[in-house]
Image (cartoon, grey):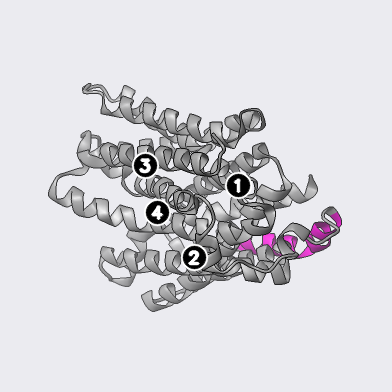
Amino acid sequence: MLLLAIIYLGYICLGLPDSLFGPAWPVIHTDFGIPVSYAGFITVAVYGTTILSSLMTDRITRKLGTGLVTAISVGLTALALLGFSFANSFPLLLFFAIPMGLGAGGVDASLNNYMAIHYSSKFMSWLHCFWGIGAIISPYIMSFRLKNDLQWQKGYLTVGLLQSVLTVVLFMSLPLWKKNHKTAEPEETQSPPLTYPQIFRLKGIFSMLLSFTAYCAIEGLAFSWTSSYLVSGRGMSAEDGAKYAALFYFGMTIGRLITGFFADKLGDKNMTRLGCLLSFAGIVLILLPLSADLPALIGLFVFGFGCGPIFPALMHSTPTVYGADKSQSVVGLQVAFGYMGSTLMPPVFGIAARHIGTGLFPYFILFFILMTFVLTENLNIKTKRV
């Protein structure tokens, strides 16, 4: 349980940088005198290196072990955050975006696989709940620093110092990983890593990978466009749009907390089905042709609540579907395909919104919810898990 607590702390710190950049960017681009659109370069650098890192994690983890990979990865994110806090030019921000992405991919791929093999479904659900806590905390840290110090650098410095402390804790905990699993994770390390042709020959693998792309497209769209939809699509003020957009974060985090209590009884398949059903219901509430905003805001929370169990359940099912000896190879690709969805779909929607309007937002979400459901059911059929 002590090791589990340390892993949860690691996932809080994985969530911290994810929602730190957005609140800081309006001040950053003004300070540096650069166009607001340059945020896209940082995003591409972070997500691109995250995808690269997740693809390399299998081989690195087999050599170093999950504990050391996690410690090094969190150390890289700490370095990146501290680098952001001292950066005095845009090229430096772009440079430090690289270790940010490398560290995020390493933590994501290695810890998810470790949890899927060694812990039950409820602990996986709560793991991702702790990511949500980190994602909720960091905007408040940045907001506090901007309000009191008028310096976005101090927001990054605060989070960077927290990550640095965690890095030290993770390195100190390395003996604990071996003590809890004395055979040094035999399921992951006894067999050689799979080649890509071997992975792509696994039953249902494309349904599995594309389900991650579809689901993470939902998260990427929700993180990027919920506030704009509330403002432009429903006529809210910018302040209210930003405030109520947090309902999705809260819904997803609380969803992962509460559904964790039922995850072991319901199983990964049914948790995914339940999540898709609740998300669908939330979007239907948003789409009701009512002038009052309350049903849509309730729908936004329900939508987030439904999203809560989907990613943890899909990830936790990987060793069951493909075996513990193959899961790290598959998880690295799952993370990579997931980040492709969350990276590519927000700008695609942006192009559509520019020509048609942000009112398309719930319809885009609805499409990817249905896509996630169809792909996961197809996976169940192909792997005989119906």
Q: Say what secondary structure mark 1 lies in.
A: helix
Q: Please, what is the dominant secondary structure of the magenta stretch? A: helix
Q: Amino acid at mark 3?
A: Met
Q: Quadrant of the N terminus?
A: top right
Depth order, front residue of 64/238: 64
In three-dimensional space, the C-alpha distance between marks 1 and 3, rounded to whole angstroms, equals 20 Å
Q: Residues within 10 Å of mark 1 (few under 14, many from 20)?
A: many
Q: Dot 1 corresponds to which residue?
A: 321
Residue 60 covered by magenta stretch: no
Q: Secondary structure at mark 4?
A: helix
The image quarter in which residue 282 lies? top left
Closer to viewer: mark 2 or mark 1 = 1
Q: Which residue is mark 4?
A: 342
Residue 359 found in image quarter:
top left
Reading the chain from its start, which is encountered first: label 2 or label 4? 2
* Residue 229 versus residue 144 in the image, above or below: above
Image location of residue 100, percent across then percent down: 51, 67
The residue under label 3 is 371
Asked if the residue under mark 1 is in contact with the one under mark 2, i.e. CB atoms within 8 Å, the reply is no
- Element carrying mark 3: helix
Where residue 252 sits in the image (x, y, percent)? 49, 37
Instruction: Examine the rendering and report whether any part of residue 213 can be seen.
Output: yes
Where is mark 2, residue-wise? 50
Spatial distance from mark 2 to mark 4, Cα to Cα?
Answer: 12 Å
Q: Please, what secondary structure does the residue beneath circle 2 have?
A: helix
